Amino acid sequence: MASPPSPSQATSPGPSRRVLILVENLPSPFDRRVWQEATTLQKAGYGVSIICPTGKCYESTYECLEGVHIYRYRLPVEAEGALGYAMEYAAALFHSFRLSLKVLWNQGFDVIHACNPPDLFFLIGGFFKLFGKKFLFDHHDLNPELYEAKFGRRDFFYRLLLKAERWTFRTADVSIATNESYRRIAMERGGMAPERVIVVRSGPSLERMKIMAPEPALKQGRNYLVGYVGVMGKQEGVDLLLEAVRHMVFVLGRSDVHFGLVGGGTSLAEMRQLAQTLGVADYVTFTGRIPDKDMLAMLNTADICVNPDVANEMNDKSTMNKIMEYMALGKAMVQFDLTEGRFSAREASLYARKNDPVDMAEKLLQLLDDAPQRQRMGAFGRNRVENELAWDYEIPKLLAAYDLIWAGQPATIRGPVLSGNAHGRPQG
């Protein structure tokens, strides 16, 4: 296992501006948004370090990839329930602070770039602000709404999460939001000045999301494959998708469709059991967390894709990576009718009634049975990513946020930085 270089090992001066990224929910480089931000900053001349948990395929406690220093820690529990999350977040906060001192000694940093959840990294950011460091908040999730979605209540912990969110925004010098809904939250609930909140969407990388030849064996001998990639958790609606599969097979009599579900999470075992209980296990492949090449094989083979995210306050305001990844591969999709999901996909998706698995089953079959329609929708989605939503269009906005944190003045967003197949105008 590699060891981080110490200051005494340095042979030349390091970058003049250095960033430490804190992330708790996924390891790097598996977390796609964080890794794109880190490598973008590194290519722009910043020294970049990341502190994150370990995970499957990412067990090393230190490695340097593409010039980015990654420090990882092991979490003692995988959270389920309020107490489990409290223990997980407390451990993450302890290890993040411990390792931040190590990064300060080995690489140094001038900015802490904190990605939630949890909304507790302001404690670390606030501490280092006492020594002249800057604090940038990267708003990934609406934690109060996430708590309500998971536990169905607005109690003491919900109110505490609102306070933690507010303290985070008050500590931040600059905040970046994943969409306009999150930007409004930063201003209205967090009290941030509008000019200090910049929208940086989680656009897909066209270098990563490559269109490839399908692998027919993944259809398990059936005519059609429906693809899904995402977390196996309660608010992701995989249970509703399995109900849709049951309706499709046993009510509508369609046994010619297979479902490939890619991703891990705390509810994976529960969803596998639910598929057995509903009698649809033979129609569903649960892959768990798999490498990119296997994920791409599943999605490229899929005739259409699906996003069953539950209609609730959190999901309605959140931009889901999976939607734009489906679009990047030219796949039409079906999802429940949510505000940010509709903004991202537009004509690349059909929209089922909220949390209605029967309507979702019918919309899936409508799309599977109409090849010209799904080809038109897939082409629309691919074109929208190429011309508006790819990560290349977000790079100037990320760099503008960093210009703002250095200058202390409203940022000027420069023109798009393009690479690969992306072309056209930047997203407004």
Image (spheres, helix red, strand yellow):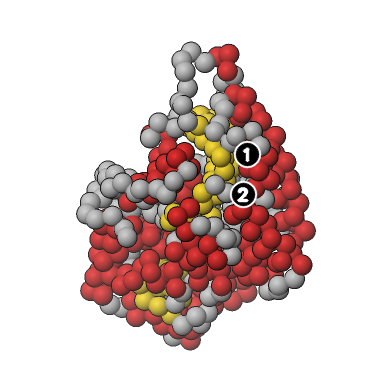
Query: Type of residue at label 1?
Result: Lys
Indicate left or right for 70 with 376 as reference.
right
Indicate left or right for 304 with 151 as reference.
left
128 over 371 or under it: above or below = above
375 over 105 or under it: above or below = below
Residue toward you, 182 or 202: 182
Q: Which residue is mark 2?
A: 171
Picture coordinates of residue 377, whole percent (x, y): 28, 70
Question: Could you give the CA–CA distance between mark 1 and mark 2, rounded to whole angstroms?
Answer: 9 Å
How packed is label 1: few (under 14 Cα within 10 Å), some, or many (20 or more)? Answer: some
54 over 69 or under it: above or below = below
> Element at badge 1?
helix
Q: Are marks 1 and 2 in contact (CB under 8 Å)?
A: yes
Name which quarter of the figure residue 240 lies in.
bottom right
Question: Going 43% across and 80% down the picture, which residue do you hit?
Answer: 352
Quadrant location of the N terminus in the rendered image? top right
Question: Going 61% across and 67% down the picture, which residue do you hit?
Answer: 145
| Residue 169 visible within the image | yes
| Mark closest to the chain's N terminus, 1 or 2 | 1
78 over 144 or under it: above or below = above
Question: Going 56% across and 20% down the picture, which residue do you hit?
Answer: 5
Name which quarter of the figure residue 129 lies in.
top right
| Residue 304 visible within the image | no
Picture coordinates of residue 66, whole percent (x, y): 43, 31
> Element at badge 2?
helix
Indicate left or right for 369 with 94 as reference.
left
Picture coordinates of residue 19, whole percent (x, y): 52, 35
In the drawing, what numbered circle is on residue 291?
none
How packed is label 2: few (under 14 Cα within 10 Å), some, or many (20 or more)? Answer: many
Q: Which residue is mark 1?
A: 129
Residue toward you, 51 or 249: 51
Name which quarter of the figure residue 53 lies in.
top right
